[in-house]
Amino acid sequence: MEPIIQADSETTPCRIPKQLVSVVVINYNYGRYLRECIESVLAQDYKPLEVIVVDDGSTDDSRAIIKSYSPRLTPAFKPNGGVISATNRGFQMSHGSVVIFVDADDYLLPGAIAAHAQALQEPGVVRSQAYMTVLHGTELSKSRIPGQCAAEGDLKDVVLQRGPGSYVCSPTSGNAWARSFLDCIFPLPENLKGVAQDCLLMDTAPLFGKTVTLDRRVAVYREHSANASAGIAEVNLENIQETLVRYEKRSARLTEIATELGHSPLLPDWKVLNWRILTLKYLRSRLARTPEAPGIAEHLRSAFKLSGTAIKKSMVAGIILSIRIAPTRMAVGIANRVIHLRTM
């Protein structure tokens, strides 16, 4: 850590020591991508830096790859327990006042850590997020994740009023977190099977402070068939049901944290204000041929409760109507284009 240099005079500024950043790489059978990920972290121009790689019981060559980087990183080898379990282990081992979790199939871009660390120096900020470039095979695309402009600022009222997934944000490797926030919510509950660890952080972070969104790309998101989210991308009956169950788990966790902090989350409103959840419930009813479906008035009302312009609200209402009047196969096709289950 850089020492504090005392000012010689009133015109000589003091140098403030940089905060330690911990990067926690989470790996499970991603040996084919792991070196690129680790190298991207070690090549960052920021210090002091602590690198921890948690291997969640891989059966490929991951263990040997991780060992080959000793002593430049701290390894953690554990039996397979899932991504939340691995994330808990990595956080427990970390010491930084800023923590970055990186999926082993992603990798960081130059300057990412320095940019996040600077953003998290601002008072009241608990999360720094930025965009990720999408890698298709071996080619970097022009597209980014998230595709829309990510939200920032004080988002507490948004999540209290609208619940999980209520604002646009970047996935795991595009974020950095203040330890002051993480200390309040870790360890994450490992019984929430099927819920991504980044969702638990995104949902609750606004209750503890502000979010800064950097107008730059800080990491690469690798699209491949083994992505944890790849299998849940298609809108079908099984994936719809799993998404709705995940939403209930996220809602319960967010409600628990908010209540502990003395807030009164508007849980009854979350589902009726979320047009995507209502649409999935409608499609589930249609595909399963059950009568449990939101009425058309309730469904359309969710579109006009959205924030944004009248044009945006009208477009969503049009999508809802199209799905409700189209033949089932076409309705599912429309939903596939506008609802991304991997982000829910």
Image: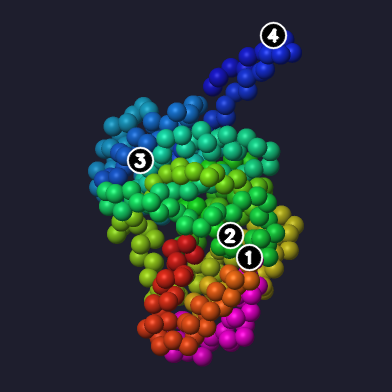
Q: Which residues are magenta?
A: 283-307
Position of residue 30 measured from the top left corner of the image (x, y, whole percent): 30, 48
Residue matched to label 4 = 8
- Queried whether the magenta region covers residue 117, the answer comes back as no
Q: CA distance from mark 3 to mark 2?
A: 28 Å
Q: Is residue 153 visible?
A: yes
Marks 1 and 3, how far apart at CA: 38 Å
Which amino acid, mark 2? Tyr
Question: Image height check: is 159 above or below 235?
Answer: above
Q: CA distance from mark 2 to mark 1?
A: 12 Å
- The residue pinned by badge 3 equals 37
- Tell me if 279 is positioned left or right of 226 in this view: right
Give, as a three-letter code, the residue at label 4.
Asp
Residue at x 45% of width, y 66% of height: 340
Tell me the SS state at disc 3. helix
Q: Nearer the viewer, mark 2 or mark 1?
A: 1
Q: Secondary structure at mark 4?
A: loop
Q: Residue at x 55, y 19 (%)?
A: 2
Which residue is the site of mark 2? Answer: 167
How many residues crowd mark 2 within 10 Å: few (<14), some (14–19), many (20+)? Answer: some
Q: CA distance from mark 4 to mark 2?
A: 48 Å
Which residue is at the front of the view, 81 or 16? 16
Q: Which residue is mark 1?
A: 308
Where is residue 169 drawn, in percent x and y?
53, 55
Q: How is the image coloured?
A: rainbow
